[in-house]
Amino acid sequence: MSKRVLIVDDAIFMRMKLKDILEKNGFEVVGEAQNGLEAVEKFKSERPDLVTMDITMPEMDGVAALKSIKQIDSNAKVVMCSAMGQQTMVMEAIQSGAVDFIVKPFESDRVIQSLNKAIR
Amino acid sequence: MDDNSKYRDLFFEETDEYLQTLNECLLELEKDPEDSSVLDEIFRAAHTLKGMAATMGYKTMSELTHSMESVLELYRNGKNLITSEIISLVFKCLDRLSEIVEDIREEKYDEIKIEDLVLELSSVAKGGPNAGNNKVAQEVDTFSSEMSETDKLIIHNANEKGYNAYNIIVTLEAGCLLKGARAYLVVNKLEQNGEIIHTEPTTEKLEEGDFENSFNLIYLSKEDAKEIKELIEDISEIEKVSIEKISLDENLAREAVVEDKQIKQTKEEKVEEVVYSKEKDKPKSNIHHASQSIRVDINKLDNFMNLVSELVIYRTRLEDISGKVNYTEINEPLEQVARITSELQDLVLKIRMEPVNVVFNRFPRMVRDLTKELKKEIELVIEGEETELDRTVVSELGEPLIHLIRNAADHGIESVEKRKTLGKSETGLIKLSAYQEGNRVVITVSDDGKGIDPEAIRESAIRKGIDVKGLGEKDLIQLIFHQGFSTAKQVTNVSGRGVGMDVVRQKIISLGGSIEVHSEVNVGTDFIIKLPLTLSIIQSLMVEVGRHTFAVPLGIIDKVVRVEKEEIFKSHSNEVYMYRGKAIPVIRVNEKLSLETTDDEKHIILIQLGDQHYGLLVDGLIGQQEIVIKKLTGILSKMKEYLGATILGNGDITLILDAGNLCSERTVEKIG
């Protein structure tokens, strides 16, 4: 069965791009959220196998969303999506239980490799 | 490289939005430099743009946004204070970004140079008070490549407790980004099942990513080598993991036993927690009522609109035919079709509506720039920006409004000194407002500046050889819309060479609207623009002129009256009709269109353009009808007398009269 993924990013563009990469590689995108609060809500309702989480977002940033999700389900698999220059945030995310991170600009291969490993 | 071409449209759309957000937020920040939430938003927008540009492979754009972001970061942590210089610099960056985006849109890549801005940005970044004062001072590498005595001791003790010590070399994939975080991920994962007692390079360097592609770890764990290896390999972007078990020389170990007590203190220090949720208790409301929406290509909507229009045409034809055949059973379904078509029509019109905000939102920035350029104090107040209009109208509206606002700033608002001597507040006010009134939208541009002096207009008009005899003050002011007229004594950069106002009026008229001006010396000037909600389907009055049928848009008609020949008077060379005690000019439509007239009963259609009434003399009235405007193309489009054409129920084609044009030509004649 294909793995169910929740995509979180504030830019529609990024979500489209990621969704495309994922669907081409046999993942099922079960939801999209454009900020941390939405992400937490969608996580509760969809219970995805995996979450890709952007870091900089309005309302609630990715790290805070990660923490909330981890409180809901400590086994939740969250892969952070970061850009260059967000080292501290990524580290905080890892500290808070993110399984991996991918760096923008996204390259399909790397994204898929990371997600496959994260989900194992 | 991935194929990104299909994301282009989306990319542009979102980029435009983010650039707009940046502009707006910067203006806000300028007003209140200490508002950290605005700064955060700016930072986020710049950051998102960077990510998007990088993903699309637009290098120049991502470089520039990256530099911007780095500078903004300095201000974000609150150490540097926002100055108007930095805001101007970021504005400059935004302008450059817009240029770059425009270029990309036209498929020109990396032609615009950004070095100057990047240089400026980096000099700001360096010039900051905390320049060169990196938080984590670089320590000299205190760890030798040899294991320290303490390490050996720890390993010895660990061995006794059943832990194994491993020397691990992790090599990251070439091109791995954020190496520091990647390394941290490895460290973090390993620490869940054991303890890292030594790293090469140091933990700090490791976390900063200050190493080539590989690093060394000494790791204590009960797990066996294979499991540890798998654990690390489970992390992405790891090229290679080599692991070997360390066995200590017994002698060394015994020596080390003495310093047993140190063991407990050697736990790796955790990275300090960075509290990053700067987000204050922002209202969380907007996620809840965010309704689902999709983006649609405007061409599809235009197409949809056209199809609905066709449907309306054939509905009218069907109604026409059913009136003739006297087949009653058809009436009920036909009524339903009529109802559904008008609902459909309503719907497509609504879909095409766009808030005027789309045009208005660029003005705060424009006025800010004008303020700097003209060295005046101007405040722009915007009201009713949520008012909606047909998309086509909205997109055409920008140009005339820019013109009016520039005029208001340049010619209207006086200099600070002048305002002081006049006893006005130092800050001039320009007000832009929009509201819906029936089936039209009214947009006003007002300023509290010096107003238009009718005497100045009179002098200028006489100099230009325009006949001003018999014109009252109000009429004189209307002359500003006359072709080739300008009262500005000097041509400035900001506004006009005297070609402006008539172009503005032409534009508004071509959108089926009207513009009028009210002005009082030293009090201010108001421009009032009235626009139809939509351009494509209108209610109209069908009239007869010389056995031909024409349509007149209902929106501009004030009243229709039947007249006898004697009720039309001659005054000077023109004919007038007395309406509410006022003489209004009469236009014989048949003369305008060079048609023969019948001697049948005559009607005057009273129309209002701006605050001026006109009477259109037509032969007969046919009735009211909903018509679909089809634009005239080719050579026909040069015929100014017509707005367009429409297809009637019986299949005939009828021209739609452009009343504004018929009447305004007369005014020009009168003046000229």
Image (cartoon, coloured by chain):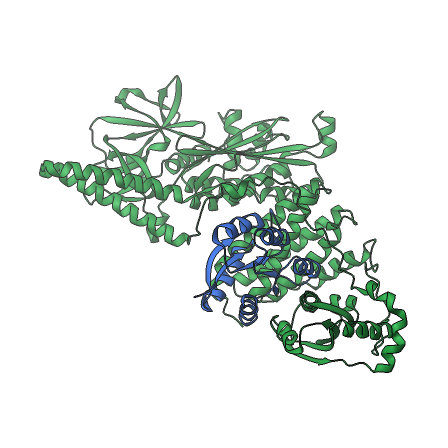
Relative horizontal placement of residue B375, taking residue B405 as reference (left or right): right
**Chain seen in green:** B
Relative horizontal placement of residue A48, taking residue B100 as reference (left or right): left
The image shows a total of numbered marks equal to 0
Relative horizontal placement of residue B221, taking residue A39 as reference (left or right): right
Choose top left, top right, bottom left or bottom right for residue B342. Answer: top left
Q: Nearer the viewer, residue B481 or A26?
A: A26
Point 70% across, 69% down: residue: B183
Q: Nearer the viewer, residue B42 or B671?
A: B42
Q: Where does residue B406 sit, x and y in percent of width and height?
A: 60, 41
> Image quadrant for the N terminus of chain B?
bottom right
Q: Nearer the viewer, residue B651 or B471?
A: B651
Q: Is residue B632 visible?
A: no
Chain A as rendered: colour: blue
Relative horizontal placement of residue B215, taking residue B325 as reference (left or right): right
Q: Where does residue B78 sit, x and y in percent of width and height?
A: 76, 48
Vertical arrangement, residue B370 with respect to residue B446, above or below: below
